[in-house]
Image (spheres, grey):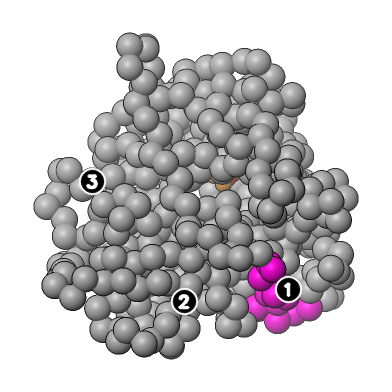
Amino acid sequence: MESGEDMNQGGMGDMMDHGNVPSLLSSEGTNELPIPPLLEKQQGQDYDYEVIAQEGITEFFKGISTETYGYNGDLLGPTLKIEEGKSVDVKITNELDESTTFHWHGLEVASEIDGGPSDEIQPGESRIVTLQADQPAATLWYHPHVHEMTAEQVYRGLSGMLLIDSSNSEDSTIPNKYGVNDIPLIFQDRLFDEDKQLDYDNLMDEDGTLGDISMINGTLNSKLTITEPIMRFRLLNGSNARNYTFSLSNGASFTQIASDGSLLDEPVEVEELILAASERAEILIDFSKLTSEESLALVNDEGVELLPFDVELDASTADSTEMWTTEEPFLSQEEKEMPVEKNIELFGMMDMVTINGKKFDPNRIDLRQKQGVTEVWEVYNKKDMMGGMIHPFHVHGTQFKVISRDGKEVTPREQGLKDSVLVNPGEKVKLLVTFPEKGVYVFHCHILEHEDGGMMGQIEVY
Ligand code: C2O
Ligand code: CU
Ligand code: CU
């Protein structure tokens, strides 16, 4: 096994450079993909749900115990589903030996409950937070955000899905049977040490720790048995740094229906989908046209079978999903012509990463914006002598729209709400940003080692 350092090709100048190196296959046999359980409602308590950050033991490799972190379990966390427009009270408890935070990535909540770096919960402490889902149905997630420890805590296993669900209120025909035809897929890559431990201090890479083994929903070598013709997958790139390019092994197209924070304006047929760290997409795959001899898998751009499918359709099952188109254009003419109000410059690599030339300082406010007022941000990924690398830019407390990339209007697959955006080296991406709540929020690169390295700033919404 190579060390993380050798595998890191970041900074070589190619836009696809970072995170596409190792083979991502492990030698273990295949496992049926586990589905994270839905978080169950508490009975007779003064809160609805409970999420506990704790230590655990996971058997990734037969007979070997690996020390991990999890929420309410050994690794990763249960899926928290909130109905669109509703709010839930969640008791958050830290049973780790170190402080943590509970960040609801993509949820437009008040900054006091956002779980950013200033919201540390000490070991043994609990708090009840009210999560209000006043935003469209979407695939969000939750993870820790302690400054300088985010990367390690996520690496050890702290992440879970947070779904805003509208299937009760709408007569939607999009598949929505959780775990049956609506499947969460948390993609992560992991590097294990010789003892098959996730010894982060020794494995970490300042430009983003890359693993040589693929993990989906916390499991190596998974496969998925398909019993329904049209399947919805909610893809989350939950890796610390790797960019994933997904496609189908037979080259067929599939349908992207959602971005990070909403359905797309209209579903788009795509043959390939790239997700930088923290980005999500929802896709539909139609298995009904496959002949029984054909095999199919979700692969990466090197043809590695990340998720092979075992298709066992009952011949009689027919299904259809009604597609939609949105009448209004994604951006109005007025929105397209708005002047740039904020310039954000992403720069550097290793421990030299900065935003607008500065490293994170919890005592400094970098930007200010008025609550409810829409502004255009221009995010520039400035190249360095090495060419630079992709930085996924994320903003807390808002779901934004991507207006353009280097002046060109974005493709339909980015025409949905987003909270993280992949910015290529040398590229300028314009965003339309509105904050519904007041408070102080962070914005940062979602390569977690860059975030921990200070590639983060604060905005005060007043
Ligand atoms: Cu995924 Cu600042 O968070
Ligand atoms: Cu976030
Ligand atoms: Cu970065």
Q: Amino acid at mark 2?
A: Ala
The residue located at (78%, 78%) in the rendering is: 12
**Residue that mark 1 sits on:** 22
Q: Which of the 4 image quarters holds residue 239?
A: bottom right
User: Looking at the image, which is closer to me, 150 or 189?
Assistant: 189
Counting residues from the N terminus, which is met first, the one under dot 3 or under dot 2? 3
Relative to 215, is 436 above or below? above
What residue is rendered at 26% in x and 66% in y?
A: 228
Q: Which mark sits nearer the N-terminus, 1 or 2?
A: 1
Q: Residue furthest front?
A: 63
Magenta stretch in the rendered image? 11-27
Q: Residues within 10 Å of mark 1 (few under 14, many from 20)?
A: some
Q: Is 144 on the left or on the right of 357, as rendered?
A: left
Q: Which residue is mark 2?
A: 297
In this rendering, the label closer to the viewer, 3 or 2: 2
Across and down, in percent, residue 29 comes to: 61, 65
Hey, what amino acid is under mark 3? Ser
- Disc 1 marks a residue whose amino acid type is Pro
Q: CA distance from mark 3 to mark 2?
A: 29 Å
Please say whether residue 15 is one of the residues in the magenta stretch. Answer: yes
Q: Is residue 210 visible?
A: yes
